[in-house]
Amino acid sequence: MADSASDVTLLLQEYGSGDRGALDRLIPILYTELRQLARHCVGGRDSGSAQPTSLVHEAWLRLAGRNASPVDGRHHFYGLAATVMRQILVDRARARLRLKRGGGGTPVTFDEALMAPDAAPEQVVELDDALQALHSMDPRKAKIVELRYFGGLSVEETAEVMELSTATVGREMRLARAWLLTQLAG
């Protein structure tokens, strides 16, 4: 079984080339790291509707079911996994909202809404809407936010995935955060 970073990269390349079995060989290698990513996405704790284990499993099913496309290494894969996990959390929040059918929402700040397990569904959806708006204006800033906050990547890792300098990532993140704060306060 593969266990080095180069083996993971090779398996990711095989998956990107259409080898669906490569994805199955990756799960035992990456499971622990994906669970840590999921724990980060749900605010560091297990909760009833967003336990890291269930989030990893659902994300894995979505990743396995998507059309294979090139994945440029481990960090790119984690960025993709973070995107899928964020989508799952937003889908769950929207489902809870449909069940709830309204109710007075409370104002939310950017830091409070970061997909915390105890965040109100309205907050999760409001943050997702703001990220979608940011993405329509500036996809690069939205991707940086996603990688940093939802993917748990460091500035250096984000810079590597995005093929940018760390200074650019830091600057773009500050601008994106300020824009999001304005949108969420709005």
Image (cartoon, grey):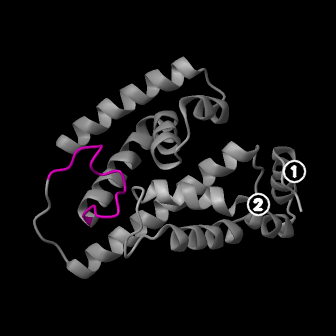
The disc labelled 1 sits on which kind of residue? Asp
Q: Which of the image's four quarters has the C terminus?
A: top left
For the point 71% across and 59% down, the residue is: 30
Report the magenta residues as a range. Answer: 107-120
The disc labelled 2 sits on which kind of residue? Ile
Inter-mark Cα distance, 1 to 2: 10 Å
The label shown at residue 7 is 1
Q: Quadrant of residue 177?
A: top left
Sequence-wise, the earlier of marks 1 and 2 is 1
* Residue sitting farthest toward the top: 167
**Which residue occupies the foreground of this view, 183 or 115?**
115
For the point 76% across and 55% down, the residue is: 69
Residue 76: x %, y % from top left:
68, 45
Is label 1 in contact with label 2 (beta carbons under 8 Å)? yes
Residue 153: x %, y % from top left:
56, 40
**Which residue occupies the foreground of this view, 183 or 123?**
123
Residue 144 drawn above or below residue 106? above
* Residue sitting farthest toward the left: 104
Residue 146 drawn above or below residue 56? above
The label shown at residue 29 is 2
Left or right of 167 on screen, residue 175: left
